[in-house]
Amino acid sequence: MLLTADDLKAHYGAAPVLHDVSFGVREGEITVLLGANGAGKTTTLRAISGTVAVAGEISFDGRSLRGLAPERIAASGIAHVPQGRGTFTELTVEENLRLGGHRRSRAEVKNDVKHWYGVFPRLAERRGQRAGSLSGGEQQMLAIARALMSRPRLLLLDEPSLGLAPIITQELFRQLAEINRDSGTTMLIVEQNANLALRAASAAFVMETGRVVASGTAEALLSDDGVRRAYLGY
């Protein structure tokens, strides 16, 4: 496993959010984390990236992340695209991308910007445009490309389809699957569109009220009528 979480617990004030959450993410695969609003999915991603305090253990490539600052976790090879995208709205598309590669050499940044323009041609067309003026789908493309500029081994994505039209969401997941296939980048995706996410993934975990209540291959969960009706809402 590239990433393992064991017995994670988290609170916001006095309210418990995660209850002994344990799971693993295999290297090179897309894993999805599913569940209703309030299930603890976003908190789980925040726990991995170090932006919320937790008890328990998180290991990445065999090394503990416990107690590390978010910038050290990012430097270890984990990139996080939060819910709401988080682009620098006053900067241009290209400035956003270059910021994403700030740890790399100038030549690497130049090559990577060119590469992601090839993957997301709409960004190339808007390279000089302010990020805040992009459509929702274009902003999500930019957020993902900017995160990938750091060449992470693990990409965390929180609700990438939020606010997007169905046809844009389908294209986005197609691109994510293609990126995973071509680069081998491991992905852990929180997503409300369970059907679409499971079709793109290799493995999945379902959360309810801060606990993992189902897990398995994406194919198995997709075909399990009981899991679909009880937890996935379709």
Image (cartoon, rainbow, N blue to C red):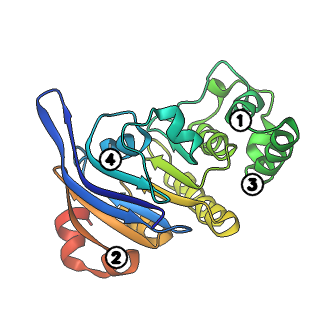
Q: Secondary structure at mark 3?
A: helix
Would you say 40 lies left or right of 219 here? left
Q: Residue at 35% x, 53% y: name it.
A: 192
The earlier-in-sequence mark between 4 and 1 is 4
Crowding around mark 2 (Cα neighbors within 10 Å: few <14, some 14 to 19, many 20+) is some
Identified by mark 2, the residue type is: Leu
Residue holding disc 2: 222
Does the CB distance between marks 3 and 1 fall below 8 Å?
A: no
Q: Quadrant of the C terminus?
A: bottom left
Residue 102 visible, this angle? yes
Identified by mark 4, the residue type is: Thr
Q: Quadrant of the N terminus?
A: bottom left
Crowding around mark 4 (Cα neighbors within 10 Å: few <14, some 14 to 19, many 20+) is many
Image coords of residue 203 (percent x, y): 40, 71
Image coords of residue 154 (percent x, y): 54, 54
Identified by mark 3, the residue type is: Val
Q: Secondary structure at mark 2?
A: helix
Q: CA distance from mark 1 to mark 2?
A: 39 Å
Q: CA distance from mark 4 to mark 1?
A: 26 Å
Q: Nearer the viewer, residue 158 or 228?
A: 158
The earlier-in-sequence mark between 3 and 2 is 3
Residue 190 visible, this angle? no
Residue holding disc 4: 44
Would you say 57 lies left or right of 106 here? left
Q: Residue furthest top?
A: 90
Residue holding disc 1: 103
Give the number of the disc on residue 119.
3
